[in-house]
Amino acid sequence: QRLMTIESPGIDAAVRDLLALTGARSDTVQALVGPARLRLQRLGMPASQVAAIEASGSVPRGLIVTAPRPGVLRAVDVRPGARVMPG
């Protein structure tokens, strides 16, 4: 279940880089697709979301954070528009 969406210029740029590389026909450029996928995963994007982006060919609004398992939220310590830091 979706918990939140994190909008980040860094994630948007990484997604755009990946999409630009996946459209290339050169073997040299295609060799950069794997590192571009890894960059998104290191930014916190699950491999399934990276694959969905590649399949759709479009830039999502942000990083979708999902719940690791079913449950109920007791507290929400982040509000719309708040800044979050990695770590």
Image (cartoon, helix red, strand yellow):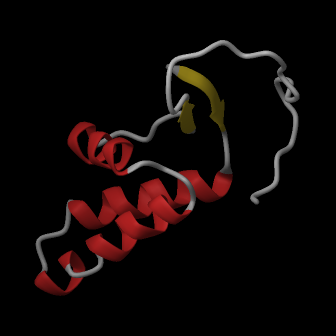
Which of the 4 image quarters holds residue 58?
A: top left
Residue 31 in the image: state x and y as whole percent.
21, 81
How far from the left and from the top, in percent, is residue 66? Answer: 53, 30
Q: Does residue 29 appear to the left or right of 70 in the view shown?
A: left
82 and 72: which is toward the camera? 72
Q: Residue at x 45, y 54 (%)?
A: 15
Which residue is found at the position 47% from the left and 68% from the top? 39
- The answer to whether 38 is drawn above or below residue 28 in the figure is above
Q: Please state if 57 lies on the left or on the right of 26 as rendered.
A: right
Q: Is residue 67 above or below residue 20?
A: above
In the depicted structure, whether residue 87 falls above or below residue 84: below
Relative side of 45 to 28, left or right: right
Instruction: Residue 19: give x, y in percent of width and height.
Output: 33, 56
Between 86 and 71, which is closer to the camera in this rendering?
71
Please identify the quadrant where the C terminus is shown: bottom right
Work out whether residue 17 or residue 43 is closer to the camera in this orientation and state it: 43
Q: Residue at x 48, y 50 (%)?
A: 45
On screen, 37 above or below 85? below
Say which residue appears at 72% left-offset and 16% top-offset. Answer: 73
| Left or right relative to 11: residue 30 | left
Provide residue 86's location: percent of width, then percent of height. Answer: 75, 58
